[in-house]
């Protein structure tokens, strides 16, 4: 495996790139080749302090600008992003490994939130009540929090940050983004775009690092909130630590998403959607389909159809090649590939049948790449760790249930509550499912029910810590705080004189 270092990736502080002096770095791989293509700096306390100080200065400038001025910068950013998103997609493919079309799709879903944020004046309006008592009015305003922190995962280096920062910036806050150290360059590209759009220095900061940077943001009294997406154990740690230090927190965790398939469903549609949702993005997404709950007697026929489709899938370099773009790119690191393989081994040891085995996947010319082929399991025990834990790879499991009620009970008994779906042509069954299921995002004949930007994203139970979901109305509520003002302007001709009694309504 090559360890050639072409560059060291630093931070973005005070509106410009900043080299790190910490002396600590982490490797950034090209997952398709397995080679180290760069090193990323891991911030020390001095750099954390500098980032926060710059963001405070940026907030003082940005929060005082008129809504019209802020809105013009957001529109400029939107136009620049739309024009140049192929550049960003190429960066994502190079560092994350996902296929180019998937990277473009990721950016498009992030753009939805940018477009929502351009309409922020309507979404942060206050309210006014006139003459609540004689001569007294009450009104509310929404004001920004100040400096806010965003900690994003490796699997969506553009989309997940865009779930948060467009709304935070629109509302008048200054953002410090701590991207994953596995694929940091997308965030720096976005920072340059904000600069070009006219955003004042310090309003968007990129702080690269590891747990030191995360803890530094959470413990600083100058950071008012933390937004996080990642695994459930880390989400819980983020929630508990940041809340202990007096911050608002929205921490989105992991998932184990189920699709319930009723006997009346169109099995060709189900098979297509199961393959798309289970293997797209190499399974590295919290909304990926993990488990197909097949209500008897459709399991065997459905497995046969899925196997037929899997046979047509091609794994390769996400950037494409002589044969065009593959369906699946590599996983993010060699360590993650081994982790996914261990879960398949656990399933096998626990009695599951490995119907399709992706562990031996090899791409000619990229033998050192972190590739893992589509994998299909049948007959997995419900007490197996391969069933109860999030795998985060291209592994689809089929579990047979006897009835609709058994399927619903099985989904509701899980500790996660991120996304789920039902496939059926029975409207009554679908309506009952959406009401009875204990999951935050539900699809009806839709396998990955990610809400559009003007609704909010987030699960239930161990998939979400904190009270606010991402984007939508929740996002604007999270990044602003409401102030209630009670006002009386006295009429000099009607002054009532001194009254020491308790104020009363009249």
Image (spheres, helix red, strand yellow):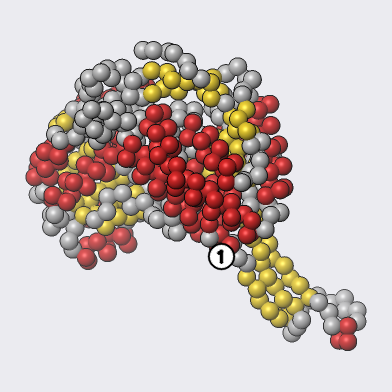
For the residue pair 131 and 363, the one nearer the viewer reads as 363
Write the residue at 39% across / 12% down. Answer: 2
* Coordinates of residue 239 in the picture (x, y in percent): 54, 41
- Residue 332 placement (x, y as % from top left): 37, 28
Residue drawn at (44%, 45%) of the image: 83
Image coordinates of residue 277 in percent, x first then y, are 27, 44
Q: SS class of the residue under badge 1?
A: helix
Task: Identify which residue is drawn at 69% across, 32% down.
Answer: 50
Badge 1 crowding class, 10 Å Cα cut-off, few under 14, some 14 to 19, many 20 or more, is few
Residue 191 position by quadrant: top right
Tally the numbered discs: 1
Q: Which of 26 and 304 is in front in this view?
A: 26
Vertically, is 224 above or below 65?
above
- Please indicate whether residue 284 sits to the left or right of residue 398 in the image: right
Q: Can residue 277 be seen in this view?
A: yes
In the image, residue 497 sits, relative to residue 391, either above or below, namely: below
Q: Quadrant of residue 19?
A: top right
Q: Is 338 located above or below residue 49 in the figure? A: above
Q: In which quarter of the image is the N terminus?
A: top left
At 33% from the left edge and 20% from the top edge, which residue is drawn? 33
Q: 332 and 384: which one is in front?
A: 332
Is any part of residue 401 visible from this angle? no
Quarter that holds the C terminus = bottom right
- Relative image position of residue 433 (x, y in whole percent): 27, 59
- Name the foreground residue: 327 vs 418: 327
Disc 1 target residue: 122
Residue reaching furthest to the front: 83
Left or right, 498 with reference to 416: right
The extreme bottom residue here reads 493
């Amino acid at each position: 495996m090559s360890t050639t270092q072409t560059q060291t990736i630093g931070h973005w502080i005070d509106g410009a790139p900043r080299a790190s002096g910490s002396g600590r770095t982490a490797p950034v791989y090209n997952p398709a080749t397995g080679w180290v293509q760069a090193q990323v700096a891991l911030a020390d306390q001095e750099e954390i302090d500098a980032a926060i100080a710059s963001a405070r200065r940026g907030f003082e400038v940005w929060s005082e600008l008129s809504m019209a001025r802020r809105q013009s910068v957001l529109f400029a950013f939107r136009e620049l992003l739309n024009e140049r998103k192929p550049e960003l997609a190429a960066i994502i493919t190079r560092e994350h490994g996902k296929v180019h079309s998937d990277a473009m799709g990721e950016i498009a879903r992030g753009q939805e939130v940018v477009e929502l944020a351009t309409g922020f004046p309507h979404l942060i309006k206050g309210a006014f009540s006139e003459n609540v008592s004689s001569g007294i009015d009450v009104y509310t305003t929404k004001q920004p929090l100040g400096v806010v922190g965003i900690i994003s995962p490796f699997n969506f280096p553009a989309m997940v940050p865009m779930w948060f920062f467009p709304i935070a910036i629109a509302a008048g806050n200054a953002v410090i983004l701590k991207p994953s150290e596995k694929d940091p360059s997308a965030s720096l590209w976005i920072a340059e775009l904000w600069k070009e759009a006219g955003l004042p220095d310090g309003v968007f900061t990129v702080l690269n690092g590891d747990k030191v940077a995360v803890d530094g943001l959470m413990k600083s009294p100058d950071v008012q909130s933390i937004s996080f997406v990642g695994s459930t154990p880390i989400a819980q740690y983020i929630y508990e630590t940041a809340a202990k230090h007096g911050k608002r927190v929205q921490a989105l965790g992991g998932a184990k998403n189920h699709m319930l398939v009723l006997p009346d469903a169109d099995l060709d549609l189900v098979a297509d959607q199961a393959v798309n949702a289970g293997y797209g993005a190499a399974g590295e997404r919290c909304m990926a389909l993990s488990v197909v709950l097949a209500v008897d007697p459709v399991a065997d026929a459905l497995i046969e159809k899925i196997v037929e489709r899997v046979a047509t899938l091609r794994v390769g370099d996400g950037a494409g090649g002589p044969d065009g773009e593959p369906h699946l790119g590599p996983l993010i690191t060699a360590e993650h590939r081994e982790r996914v393989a261990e879960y398949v081994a656990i399933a096998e040891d626990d009695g599951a049948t490995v119907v399709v085995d992706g562990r031996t996947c090899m791409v000619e010319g990229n033998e050192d790449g972190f590739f893992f082929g589509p994998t299909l399991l049948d007959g997995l025990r419900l007490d197996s760790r391969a069933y109860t834990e999030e795998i985060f790879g291209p592994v689809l499991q089929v579990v047979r249930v006897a009835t609709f009620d058994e399927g619903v009970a099985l989904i509701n008994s899980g500790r996660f509550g991120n996304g789920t779906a039902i496939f059926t042509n029975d409207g009554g069954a679908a309506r009952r499912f959406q009401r009875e299921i204990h999951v935050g995002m539900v699809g009806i004949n839709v396998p990955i029910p990610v809400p559009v930007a003007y609704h909010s994203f987030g699960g239930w139970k161990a998939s979400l810590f904190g009270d606010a979901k991402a984007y939508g109305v929740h996002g604007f509520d999270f990044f602003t705080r409401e102030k209630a003002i009670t006002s009386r302007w006295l009429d000099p001709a009607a002054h009532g004189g001194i009254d020491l009694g308790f104020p009363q309504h009249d």
